[in-house]
Amino acid sequence: MLEKQLKVWFLHSLKQWHLSKNKRQMPWKGEKDPYKIWLSEVILQQTRVEQGWAYYERFIKKYPTVHDLAQSIDNDVFKLWEGLGYYNRCRNLLSTARMVSKELNGYFPTTKEGLLQLKGIGNYTAAAIGSFAFGLPLAVVDGNVYRIISRVLGIEEPIDQPKGKLLFEQLADELLDKKEPASHNQAMMDFGATLCTPKNPRCETCPFAAKCVAFNKNLQYKLPVKAKKVKTKNRFLYYLILEYKNQRLVRKRGQGDIWKDLYEFFLVEKDEPVDDRSLKNNGFWSTQKIFSPQQIQQLSDQLIHQLTHQKIHSRILHVKIDQKVIIEGYQWMNRSELNKIAFPRLITRYLENL
């Protein structure tokens, strides 16, 4: 239990900052429509606000209501999502939209328990929708909240362990302004994003500085604590763009790996890097002769794509051929068809630079 005096000081300091200093603008800020709040929260999972902003506006323009999204074609939504990554969010988006539209008549549940029944909604998203749309006294606990509480109170319990998560949820609930949960949650998220940042926190203008344990003990860069170190797996993906007249050879990725349901060009994966000479050789790609050296258009530099637990190293060989080849699992598509399907961000970046 936190001392009452400490809670009063914390809430007063945060509220004063929010009312007088918080100038952060976002299109969903102050929104009461649960559909728009939910959409913004799903987009912003694992995504910076600066990047998610444009996606949010495009989604709202094309799918202004949950019914519009529910009735959409899967591939159209994937195409609109293209570049955001973490495509499981997109699949959950469609699943939940259809459940709310068809089974709940377009109405989102008004309780935390009800919200948690929807696919892709966990405690954080349920608290955000519940507090912003319905005024429920639920504390949003995200990276910003972990950082603020751990630094101000000097909490060294690891945030990635069950004990630590429970502790921070309890502290966030104790510090919550139960009368104005939406305003409080917005203030916490904005404060963490603009002042109490992971790097270079603006302690000199922080209203908590006088009593902040991390500031007074010079622990800003040590808090919050994480017990686990993420191990990154390196993967080497080599793509061959086969172009015949107005068509290119592609396939849809299947289950059980990254980028499920997205499209890609002819792929060869290796356990280690491959040199230029090998990549320009037919034998690397197939036992059949697909192209001649004269048909090679371009070999990309190394392309790096960082995922949560994987680092993708890729190169792309672009070849124009004068006779179609048949490769099992792949299909030829013309340019208009290619413009309608979603590729992984690694490939779209390459195509944008062609």
Image (tube, grey):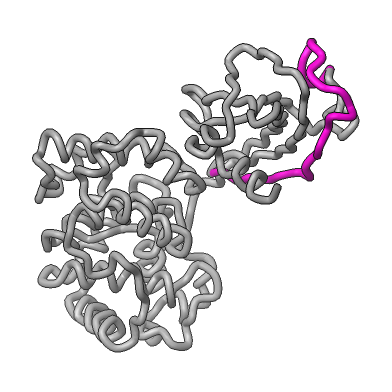
For residue 154, side relative to residue 345 (left or right): left
**Residue extending furthest toward the front:** 245
Quarter of the image where the N terminus is located: bottom left
The answer to whether residue 1 of the structure is visible from this angle is: no
Task: Decide: is 30 above or below 107.
Answer: below
In this rendering, the answer to whether 1 lies above or below 37 is below
The stretch of residues the image draws in magenta is 283-307
Identify the residue shown where x is 58% and y is 15%.
329
Task: Give the image quarter of residue 312.
Answer: top right
Q: Is residue 46 left or right of residue 273?
A: left
Q: Is residue 238 left or right of residue 142?
A: right
Residue 128 pos. (x, y %): 24, 57
Q: Residue, x 40% and y 70% (percent of image)? A: 192
Q: Who is closer to the viewer here, 40 or 137? A: 40
Residue drawn 35% across the image and 69% down it: 26
User: Where residue 217 sits in the image (x, y, percent)?
Assistant: 49, 78
- Residue 259 is covered by the magenta coloring: no
